[in-house]
Amino acid sequence: MKLFQHKSGILTNSIFTAFALFFLVFMFSSFTTPPANSDAIVGVWKTGEGTAMVRIYKNGDKYQGKIVWLKEPNDPETGKPKVDKNHPDESVRSRPILGLINVWGFVHKGENVWEDGNIYDPKNGNTYSCTMKMDNPNTLEVRGYIGVSLIGRTDVWTRQVAK
């Protein structure tokens, strides 16, 4: 009888240990955050002014975006589709704004942040260093700057189409 109790005690301890281990693993996993989704930025975003939409997509291991919609697609002066008339390189000033890649080179850095990118503003022909940060699945802070990020401007884009 004593031998039976001993084996039963070992069995009970083994079950208790296994349950405790499972509980600890469960508790640990519920407190850790899952890895950030690097493709969360993929989709169509309306700029803060609401004058354009940019489709962001993955190109190799980086992210870029192109203008896929313009509130005013035609130049009021010519009546023709808007072109990149302010670009510093005269040889590309006839390229259309619609379809233009205006954000490129972004690398996902985790914590819903994409850095090391550039943004081109066809309104003034300037290219800026840029970072992007998702505050939530439908809001993207796009910060263009020259030199250091402290000196720049942030525009808040709104998701229009998921992926």
Image: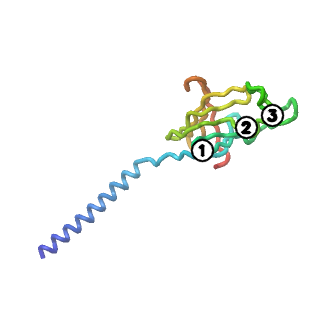
Label 1, label 2: how far apart the Cα atoms are:
18 Å
- Tag in front: 1 or 2: 1
Percent x, y of residue 67: 72, 39
The tag earlier along the polypeptide, 3 or 2, is 3
Q: Residue furthest left?
A: 2
Q: Which residue, as the protein is rendered here, is positioned at the far right? A: 78
Quadrant of residue 150 within the rendered picture: top right
Residue beneath the point at 27% across and 65% down: 15
Separation of residues labelled 3 and 1 (CA atoms) = 29 Å
Looking at the image, is 24 positioned above or below residue 88?
below
Mark 2 or mark 1, which is nearer the start of the sequence? 1
Q: Is residue 17 left or right of residue 124?
A: left
Residue at label 1? Answer: 60
Mark 2 lies on residue? 100
Q: Position of residue 6 (x, y in %)?
A: 15, 70
Residue 19's label in the rendered image is: none
Q: CA distance from mark 3 to mark 2?
A: 11 Å
Residue at the disc numbered 3: 82
**Position of residue 153 in the picture relative to residue 49 (left or right):** left
Residue closest to the eye, 96 or 139: 96
**Classed neighbour count for the residue bearing mark 2: other residues with Cα under 10 Å, few (<14), some (14–19), many (≥20):** some
Tell me what residue is drawn at x 86 percent, y 29 percent: 77
Task: Look at label 3 and name its amino acid.
Answer: Lys
Q: Does dot 1 land on a helix, a strand or a loop? A: loop
Residue type of the residue flagged with mark 1: Gly
Image location of residue 24, percent across then percent down: 33, 54
Label 2: which secondary element: loop
Alpha-carbon neighbours of circle 3 within 10 Å: few (<14), some, or many (≥20)? many
Q: Disc 3 vs disc 1: Cβ atoms closer than 8 Å?
A: no
